[in-house]
Amino acid sequence: MKTVTYDDAEWALVPRKLTPEWSERLSRRTTGMPGLGFPIAVLSGAIEELVRTAPSPSESSPFQLAVHRWVLRCFGPEIADDPVERNHRLVEEAIELAQSCGATADQCHRLVDYVFSRPPGETRQEVGGVMLTLAALCSAHDIDMHEAGTAELVRAWECMDKIRAKQITKPKYAALSDNDPVLTTAASVPREG
């Protein structure tokens, strides 16, 4: 069997456990990719080996660790470790990305209504969904997501004071309401690049 080595970022993508149920599902499916219609079962041995030898989650994501260190340095632990603040910043960035790719406000509002019409998902699975969807979006737009993420982290370190100043003007979750003057003001101020 050929030995394949992976860097830490690649290991972060490997599932931690391949359950018997998923192993059975994989054995019955094909890749669904044109020209690659072979059963996924062909890959199951390799997948099981990757899962068995994968490092622990704490070792698996140097980029995530680097970003966390930057957020701590830039904003301190109160903001860095606030799950509600992190939720809002993710939603903001996701909407800005969708907007930059041509989505309209109306489309985004309808998607919000659609998502909130259903029960909440399991957080870890939704994180995986966000990562898969971001990778697919980047592929569709011919963007290297790892290069873009690294470049943005470098830029963030270079303009930390500007980012801190901008953070002060962002709406806080306690103040997020339709009548919030911060939201009204923030909506009229052009964003930085």
Image (cartoon, rainbow, N blue to C red):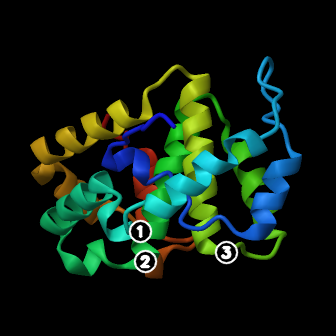
Q: Considering only vertical position in the picture, is 143 above or below 108?
A: above
Which corner quadrant of the image does residue 60 belong to?
Answer: bottom left
Decide: marks 1, 3 in contact (CB < 8 A)?
A: no
In the figure, 101 relative to 187: above or below? above
The answer to whether any part of residue 191 appears in the image is yes
The amino acid type found where label 2 is placed reads Pro
- The CA distance from mark 2 to mark 1 is 5 Å
Task: Read off the residue under disc 2.
Answer: 83
Q: Residue 115, located in which quarter of the rendered image?
A: bottom right
Q: Is residue 23 above or below residue 20?
A: above
Q: Which quadrant: the C terminus?
A: top left
The label on residue 122 is 3
Which type of secondary structure does the marked residue at label 2 adopt?
helix
Residue picked out by circle 1: 86
Q: Position of residue 4 (x, y in %)?
A: 42, 37
Q: Amino acid at mark 3?
A: Glu
Query: Compared with residue 49, is residue 126 higher up or lower down, i.e. above or below?
Result: below
Q: Between 110 and 64, which is closer to the camera in this rendering?
A: 64
Q: Position of residue 65 (x, y in %)?
A: 26, 61
